[in-house]
Structure formats: C-alpha cells, structure tokens
Image (cartoon, rainbow, N blue to C red):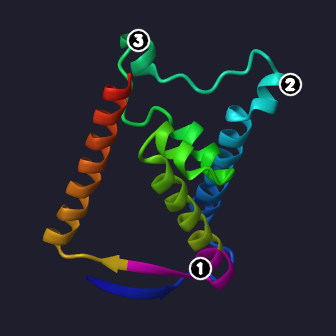
Amino acid sequence: MRLAVETIRAGRGDARTWFALVAILAFFLYSFWASSPRAREAVPHLKPPVCLLKFSTGIPCPFCGITTGTYRMLNGEVGRAWRANILSPAAAALLGIVAAYLLVFWVLAGRRLRVEAPFPRSRTLWYLAAAAIGASWAVNLWRA
C-alpha cells in the first residue's frame, strides 16, 4: 500500500468536497434531530426515516438503526448505539474522520491524500466490508 500527498487548488477544495461536508453535517444534524425525544415532543408527527425494505416486507435491512445509532453516538451512548445497529459506532466514527479529513486537508491545506492499494489488498477490504454488512444484517434479523 502506498500513500501519496498531492497538492490541489489552493485552499478552497472543490464542489464535491463541499457537497460531501454538507451531506455529512446534514446527516449528523438529521440524526440528532429525528431521533431526539425532545424533537418528538415538539413535533409529535415526526418519525425517523422509514426503511423501504422493512416497510414493504417487514424484514430489516443491514442499515436499519444507523440514524438512531448515530444519535446515540453523538450523545456518547456507545452501548445504546451498538444495540441500535452494530455498524453505527463505526459509521459515526468513519463519518467524523472523513469530515475532519475533508475540512483540514482539502479545504484548509489544499492537499489530499491518495492511497494506492494493490488489487489483492483492496479486494480484502471489500470482503471485510461485505462481512461487516452481512453481520449487521444477521444481527438485525435475529433481533427482529
């Protein structure tokens, strides 16, 4: 695996970078707002997002509970986040790391990191991601 630092347009990033930052921020804010008991009291008809698979078949998808889990992580409740979805602590941490990376490296420093992994290693990472999603789905099905 090789790590390289590239200089990009000085200090401003590009539209995709800003879109990614805004999307991550919007997800965190929505997670906090939609899963908050205070928000439910203030707006009684407020419901967290509906999973189309669970709505149509009754079977939870591997990502059911991520929004609630992210809210729990924002409140420092790692155990409750884990119970919402086993991927939510990792997803919240990964989104935070990506947001920090985009803000610090791309926007402020005008640089980006490029990671080059040979095919066998990159394939292993994809297999690990698929295994984590499969484990999440198995746990969600077991809990349902």
Is the residue under label 2 in contact with that under label 3 (CB below 8 Å)?
Answer: no
Dot 3: what SS? Answer: helix
Pick the residue in front: 125 or 3. Answer: 125
Quarter of the figure that contains the C terminus: top left
User: Residue 95's x, y, as percent?
Assistant: 54, 58
Residue behind mark 1: 105
Indicate whether 22 appears above or below 59.
Answer: below
Q: Earlier in the sequence, mark 3 or mark 2?
A: 2
x 51%, y 40%: residue:
66
Indicate whether 62 appears above or below 53.
Answer: below
| Disc 1/disc 2 C-alpha distance (Å) | 39 Å
- Which kind of residue does numbered mark 3 sit on? Ser
| Disc 3/disc 2 C-alpha distance (Å) | 29 Å
x 40%, y 79%: residue:
114
Residue 36 found in image quarter: top right
- Which kind of residue does numbered mark 1 sit on? Phe
Magenta residues (range): 104-114
User: Residue 17's x, y, as percent?
Assistant: 59, 63
Q: Nearer the viewer, mark 1 or mark 2?
A: 2
Residue behind mark 2: 42
Is the residue under label 1 in contact with that under label 3 (CB below 8 Å)?
Answer: no
Indicate whether 13 appears above or below 84.
Answer: below
Residue behind mark 3: 56
Q: Seen in the image, is 66 located left or right of residue 24? A: left
Quarter of the figure that contains the N terminus: bottom left
Dot 1: what SS? Answer: helix
Neighbours of disc 2 within 10 Å: few (<14), some (14-19), many (20+): few
Indicate whether 79 appears above or below 20.
Answer: above
Q: Earlier in the sequence, mark 1 or mark 2?
A: 2
